[in-house]
Structure formats: C-alpha cells, structure tokens
C-alpha cells in the first residue's frame, strides 16, 4: 500500500488548524503546538546548571516516575475521556478515596486476597460511575453538579468506613501491586499507566468511539442529529473515568502502604490541570499524550525546585494551579486568534474573488 | 423607482399621524429590498403590514428599529417630529415587540417591567418592592391582565407574557403617544391567547399609541387591524382601510395575481412508498398523515406555527412525538435520531451552525461522522480510507474549496450545506429530509443543491423538502403539501403547483 494519498498534492494545511494527521514531525512539536516540550527543555537546562549532581542522577527521575508521576497521570488519563465528551467528572477524588478505603478495609480487616479486594474496589468505582452517568444522562443534571455531589457522598463513605483513621498493616503482596520493580527500578504502577494510556489513546484516536466522544463534546446537539448516541457515550465516559480513578485509588494505597480516607483529594487538581494543559498540546483538544506529558513536566519541575531549594509542601498546588489557569487562558487566547485568522482569511478570499 | 403610491411629503406640523414614512428605500448588495416604500400610522389605530417573505416588510421594520440604515432620500416623521432613518438607532418613542418578547422568564412581571428603566430604590439601595408591585399591577390591569405580577414570567401563559411585554413597551409613555411594532407576535400562539393579546393591544391603542402589526395570518389582520399596507417586491402595492377589503382581495394584493380555483389532484406517484407517517401529533402537528415515495421530491409548505417547522424534527425523532408512527420501507422509527439513521432517514436541519455541524472540527470529520463503521479497518479508523471517501464526496457535491482538512466553519453557507448533504448521502439513506435547504445559501450553491437532490431522487431516494420559500418548492418538487394548523390543507401537483398557489393556500 504505497499509493500516493489523494490529497497530498493539495495546499498545506495551516498549522493553527488542529485537524489532520499529515504533518511533519517537526510541526508536531513546533512551539505553538507543543510548548510543553520547550518548557521542559528550559527546566531541564536550568536544573542541570543549578543542581547538576542531583539532576543528572537516575534516582531523581526514577523517584519522580515512581513516587509522584504514575498515579496522578493514571487519574488524568481517565479524566480525558469525559472531558473529551464535554462532561466534567469532579467525583474522581471521592472515587479514589472510596476505592482506597474499600480495598484497605477488605485486605487488612477482612483478610481478603489482593485481587478480590481490587475487584471489590472497582465495583465501588463502577457503581459511582453508573450513578454519575444516570444523574447526568437520564436525570439531566449538569455533570459538574452531579459529580460534585456523588464525589462528596463517596468521600463521606470513605470517612465512615475508615472511622477517620489510617488503615495500615498490609501484606507485602498488596504493596507489590504498586511497588514491584520491573526494570531499572521502575515500579509496576508505571506499567499500569503505560497500558491504560495506550488503551485510552487507541480508543479515542483510532476507533469511531473517539470521534463520537469528540463530536458529543464539541456540539452535542449536532452530534445527536448526526446519529451519534450522545447519551450513551457520555454515560460510558463517566463510567470509564470512575473505573480508572478507582483503580488509581487502589494503586496509590498499595504504593504508600496505607489506606487514607482522603487519598483522592490531591489528585483532583492535578488531573484537571494536566488534562487542560494537555489539551493545548499536540492536538488542540483533550488528548492522552499531551496530558501525560503535562503531568511529567509539571512534576519534574516541582522535583527540580525541591532539589535546588528544599521540599515545600505548597509547590505542587502552586504549580498545578498555575498550570490550570495558564492552560485554559492560553487556549482561550488561541481560540480568539483562530477566529481572527479565519475572519481575515475569509476577507482575503472574498477580496480575491 | 416606480409607482410608489402618490404621497404628500410629510409635513412637520402634521399631528394626526404617529408615524409617516415616505419614499424609503434600502439596497443590499445585489438586491433592492425596499423601493420607495411608505407607511402611515394613525394614533389609536392598528396598522397591518403584510406581504410575502422577501416582500420587504421585515426590512422596513428593521429600519424603524434601527438595525438597518435606510438609503438616503426617504422622509419620516414620528409624532410630528422629523425622524432620521439613516441613524441606525431606534427612536425613544418606537418600541418593537419581537416574537420572543425579550422577557427574562425566571423573573416576575414586576422585575421585568423594572429591568429596562431601573428599580425605584430607597435607603441603602433597597428596592421599594411595594411601590414597584403596585405600579406593575396598575399598568398590567390597564391592559386587562388578571394574573399576579409577582409570579415568574415563565409560568404565565403565552398571552399573559405578551401583555407583560406590552406593559413594558408602555413604560415611560405616560401621555400615551408612540409607535409599537408587533413583529409576528402570534406566530406560535394558540387561538385563545391570540384573542386575549388582541384585547390588550386594543386597550393599549386606546391610549393614543399607533400600532404596526405584522402577521402572516390574514384572519388576524381582519380581526385586529384598522388600516393596512401591502408590500410586494419592496414596493407598496396597496394601502387603505381594512374594512374595504375582502379576504380574497387581500390575498390577490399580496400574491399579485388572481388565482384560479384548484381541483384536488389524485394521489399516486411512481415508486413504492418509502417514508410513511401516520397520525403524527406534536406541539403543532395534529394527526398528520404523509407518504413519500421512492424517487419523489415532496415539498412541505406552511406558515410558522402550521407544523411545517416541526415536521422534520418529528420525522427524524429529534423531537418527541406525542403520537403517531413513522416507517421507512416498513421499518419502524424508534425515538431517537440514532434509530432514525438506522432505519434510513437523514435530516439536513435548518440551523446548520447549531444542529447541522460541528464548526471547529474539520470538514472531513463532519462528513464522516454519521458513518464511521466502514472506515474502521483492521482495528483502526483508517485515515486513508476516510480521506479518500470524503474527497470523493467533496467532489460529488462540488465542495469549494475542496480542502477537507479545513475547519467546517470556514466554509461559506452554501458549501456548508453541500457538506451536510454529502454527510447524509454517504450513509445511503432511504429518505432524505431537508429543513430550509437553501437558507443562507448563495445562488450558485443553490442550483448545485437542487441538482444533488434531483440526482438523489433519480436514484430512488425519497426526498422531503420543508421550506418557507414558495418559489423553491414550486420549482423543485413534484408535489407540495400545504400545512395549516397542524394538518394538510391541500396538496398541489402538476400544473396547479405554482409559487402563487402555495402562498395562496398558506394564507387561507
């Protein structure tokens, strides 16, 4: 299959249009489309000069990978799905906490096996996702509100189940779920991220489902009138993000070796910030690799600052909060620029005609 | 400039008219919308402004409302004072009441009345609710209202809401003078509401205001109006007192020719029945039966509120049917658009921007969206197959520019419509429904689209075209169904099928 594709001869597509996939490798990472690559490069250079000994150590990057990066990236990848379909899922933090506490309680107090406890935690997440879906799709509650409420109820469940205490005393088998070392000291949770990211990437970029989700998110009315089952895809998107958040909750518990009723709380901000920052990268819409890259870059920068100065607890929030606002602000500005450019082009065409 | 009725140039001392407009013209690029039109509205009287779509009446109203700027050379006075029609602003004593009324549904009548002029406040900016409520009640009761002005406007009936809008128009007209323009206020109103609104308009008029009433429903013109002006092709073709008119003479003025009586043609078209609707009920439709055969282009005409604009959505299950069944080649339509696509119905909606397309996705994605399955090859959505498929369709519908990677919203209206049609022809439907297919479409694209529809019908597709353009229906369709009050008024075919006949039956 080496026939020339029919539209190769046609004029170049403007780089500000986020559409086709026939782009050169360079234009994919041009500063306008992949600013995050340049931010990372600048940060890398900065810390290489500032704290060269620590920065050029594999241990540093390994600890970012294992300890700070994997779980938030898993949650953020899950969040991409409903965001693509135009639905907010604020319940992910509550789902994580609920699944964390469910699995801890079953493993520690009830003596369940690792995988049955994991399955039970996923059932809790599934119930939460279905509830979100029903409230949004059937009842018609705004996703922001419905998932906020469901998330709070799940948080309450986690609090009640744990009695407000940290659950510890896991068998090693449970901790291994997250911490088993695979290669170069990289832990299993990184593998989970890679597998999940590839699955989500495949579904949203290479199957019709991705198009349906995207059409639903971009113009639900028009998508419905084009024959897309918008309610079905919104529902499935919310179930997907809940299941992935539930899985992340268990992995996080296994990773730190303690079950906490507010396990999920810090991951809400990081997931939204990464997904929105990711949406300004590579594609001009929510996408998996932009999101994963955003988590990696932000956490690496946090790590670098920690190494250079000292560990500040507020660094994470500062970085992710700023990233969220900058990302959304940037995409608004880009949108206006696109509209302006399109208007200018139309005028030129009209004058030429 | 021809044959505008003789008109004395308005004199600034003439107090017996609320509004006098003379020799007003408006030229859009490539089109004369108004050609020396005139309008005289007397105080305390309702003046009906009638004409077909495109006759210039909405242009005239938009000039009075300051949306459009008239060409130089017209004269106008309002309450004896000269009125500048080229200013692009609305005069303080002119109030236009649009079909949507412009009320905030979640607020009460009291609040809606106060919004325009500001609340009366006391100490610390506190709203004086008691006096506000009393004021509102007085002005509403004066128009015959009996409802509680503190209720949210959204909970009121259509006529009650219209009365609130009337009362708001009256705010600040304490001496009663001014011009109220009612722009098709009754288009989506039920009969009892219309009667109540008319009573309120009468009371309003009695205070000395002049009212311009725009409606397509001629029985309403006879019911409420004292005077009339008929526009055709941008010119005034008649004006005077409604009492001197008959129903038929008014239709003749609007259409421009006398119409022969029609005999009902007998049914039966070539192909097999494809799209069959029986006993279709909706918000407007009242038990409509409809059959479209293979290879046939059927038109649907009707005024706003006749059910014409509801029909496409009901046939595509985009809106809920109150009752009735729709089948396509015997397959029964379910209750969502997905099921419509599955049984082989396609809908090109009237509002392309909101319902027909996803503006900031590419043309390619818009065209392929409704049928992605065949492009899912060996576990992947094949971009190559998609591009080839879309390119061939872009070619078939003569899309310009034929660059499928462009954003959909960068296309002209006509090319957007071609792309939406391509999307549906690609799914090989059995029945294609189009709602206002050439709205906002340039002349060149129009003929391309007509050609596409004829070709599609030639290949055995059942095509249903719902349109407010009588000319379009007459030239494109083999038969046209005229709707009124949710039912079929008549069916025109053969040599009875002319644009005039369609308008004639619409206005009946």
Image (cartoon, rainbow, N blue to C red):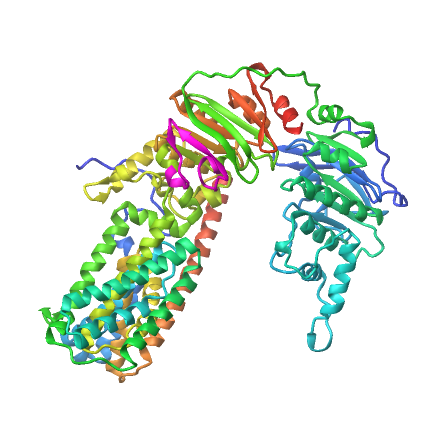
- Image coordinates of residue A216 in percent, x first then y, are 38, 50
Residue B332 highlighted magenta (yes or no): yes
- Image coordinates of residue A141 in percent, x first then y, are 44, 58
Residue B362 highlighted magenta (yes or no): no
Which residue is at the front of the view, B328 or A43?
A: B328
- Does the image show residue B299? yes
In the drawing, does residue B216 fall left or right of residue B373? right
- Image coordinates of residue A270 in percent, x first then y, are 32, 70
- Does the image show residue A183? no
Which residue is at the front of the view, B485 or B337?
A: B485
Residue positioned 63% across, 60% down in the render: B107
Residue positioned 67% across, 44% down in the render: B68
- Image coordinates of residue A343 in percent, x first then y, are 49, 48
The image quadrant that residue B230 belongs to is: top right
Q: Is residue B207 above or below residue B242?
A: below
In the drawing, does residue B165 fall left or right of residue A190? right
Which image quarter is the N terminus of chain B in?
top right
Segment tinted magenta in the rendering: B313-339
């Amino acid at each position: 299959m080496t026939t020339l594709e029919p539209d190769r001869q046609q004029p170049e597509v403007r780089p500000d249009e986020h559409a086709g996939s026939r782009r050169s490798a360079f234009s994919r990472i041009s500063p306008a489309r992949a600013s995050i690559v340049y931010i990372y490069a600048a940060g890398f250079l900065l810390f290489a000069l500032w704290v060269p000994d620590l920065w050029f150590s594999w241990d540093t990057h390994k600890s970012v990978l294992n300890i700070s990066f994997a779980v938030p990236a898993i949650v953020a990848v899950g969040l991409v799905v409903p965001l693509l379909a135009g639905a907010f899922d604020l319940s992910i933090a509550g789902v994580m906490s609920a699944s964390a506490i469910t699995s801890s309680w079953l493993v520690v107090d009830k003596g369940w096996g690792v995988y049955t406890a994991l399955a039970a935690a996923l059932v809790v997440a599934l119930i939460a996702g279905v509830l979100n879906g029903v409230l949004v799709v059937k009842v018609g509650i705004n996703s922001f509100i419905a998932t906020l409420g469901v998330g709070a109820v799940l948080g309450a469940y986690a609090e009640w189940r744990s009695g407000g205490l940290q659950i510890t005393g896991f068998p090693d088998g449970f901790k291994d779920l997250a911490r088993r070392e695979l290669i170069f000291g990289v832990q299993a949770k990184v593998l989970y991220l890679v597998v999940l990211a590839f699955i989500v990437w495949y579904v949203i970029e290479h199957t019709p489902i991705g198009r349906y989700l995207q059409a639903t998110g971009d113009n639900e009315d028009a998508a419905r009138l084009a024959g897309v089952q918008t309610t079905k895809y919104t529902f499935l998107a919310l179930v997907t993000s809940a299941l992935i958040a539930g899985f992340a909750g268990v992995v996080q518990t296994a990773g730190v070796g303690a079950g906490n009723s507010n396990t999920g709380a810090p991951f809400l901000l990081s997931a939204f910030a990464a997904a929105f920052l990711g949406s300004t990268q590579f594609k001009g819409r929510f996408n998996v690799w932009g999101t994963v890259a955003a988590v990696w870059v932000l956490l690496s920068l946090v790590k670098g600052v920690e190494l250079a100065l000292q560990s500040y607890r507020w660094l994470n929030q500062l970085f992710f909060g700023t990233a969220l606002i900058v990302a959304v602000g940037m995409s608004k500005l880009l949108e206006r620029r696109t509209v302006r450019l399109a208007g200018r082009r139309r005028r030129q065409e009209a004058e030429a005609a | 400039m021809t044959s505008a009725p003789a008109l004395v140039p308005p004199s600034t001392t003439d107090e017996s008219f609320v509004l006098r407009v003379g020799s007003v013209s408006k030229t859009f690029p490539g089109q004369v919308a108004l050609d020396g039109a005139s309008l005289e509205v007397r105080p305390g009287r309702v003046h009906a402004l009638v004409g077909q779509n495109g006759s210039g009446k909405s242009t005239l109203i938009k000039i009075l409302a300051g949306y459009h700027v008239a060409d130089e050379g017209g004269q106008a006075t309002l309450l004896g004072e000269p009125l500048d029609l080229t200013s692009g602003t609305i005069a303080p004593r002119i109030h236009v009441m649009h079909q949507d009324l412009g009320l905030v549904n979640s607020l009460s009548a009291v609040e809606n009345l106060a919004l325009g002029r500001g609340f009366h406040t006391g100490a610390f900016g506190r709203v004086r609710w008691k006096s506000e409520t009393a004021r509102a009640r007085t002005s509403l009761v004066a128009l015959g209202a009996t409802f509680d002005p503190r209720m949210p406007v959204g909970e009121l009936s259509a006529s009650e809401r219209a009365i609130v809008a009337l009362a708001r128009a009256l705010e600040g007209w304490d001496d009663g003078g001014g011009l109220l323009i009612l722009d098709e206020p009754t288009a989506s109103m039920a009969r009892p509401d219309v009667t109540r609104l008319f009573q309120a308009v009468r009371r309003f008029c009695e205070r000395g205001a002049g009212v311009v009433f725009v409606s397509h429903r001629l029985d309403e013109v006879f019911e409420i109006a004292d005077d009339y002006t008929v526009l055709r092709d941008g010119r005034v073709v008649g004006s005077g007192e409604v009492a001197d008119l008959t129903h038929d003479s008014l239709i003749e003025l609007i259409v421009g020719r006398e119409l022969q009586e029609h005999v009902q043609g007998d049914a039966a078209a070539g192909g097999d029945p494809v799209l069959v609707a029986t006993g279709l009920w909706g918000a407007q439709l009242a038990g409509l039966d409809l059959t479209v055969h293979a290879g046939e282009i059927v038109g649907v005409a009707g005024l706003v509120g006749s059910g014409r604009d509801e029909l496409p959505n009901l046939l595509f299950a985009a809106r809920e049917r109150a009752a009735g069944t729709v089948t396509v080649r015997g397959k029964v339509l379910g209750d969502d658009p997905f099921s419509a696509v599955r049984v082989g119905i396609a809908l090109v909606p009237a509002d392309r921007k909101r319902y027909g397309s996803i503006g900031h996705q590419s043309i390619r994605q818009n065209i392929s969206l409704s049928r992605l399955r065949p492009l899912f090859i060996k576990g992947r959505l094949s971009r190559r197959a998609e591009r080839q498929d879309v390119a061939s369709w872009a070619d078939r519908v003569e899309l310009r520019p034929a660059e499928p990677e462009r954003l959909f919203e960068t296309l002209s209206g006509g090319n957007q419509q071609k792309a939406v049609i391509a999307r549906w022809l690609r799914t090989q439907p059995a029945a294609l429904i189009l709602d206002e297919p050439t709205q906002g479409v340039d002349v060149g694209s129009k003929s391309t689209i007509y050609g596409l529809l004829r070709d599609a019908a030639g290949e055995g597709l059942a095509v249903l075209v719902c349109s407010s353009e009588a000319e379009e229906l007459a030239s494109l369709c083999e038969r046209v169904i005229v709707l009124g009050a949710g039912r079929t008024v008549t069916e025109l075919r053969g040599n009875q099928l002319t644009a005039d006949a369609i308008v004639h039956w619409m206005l009946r």
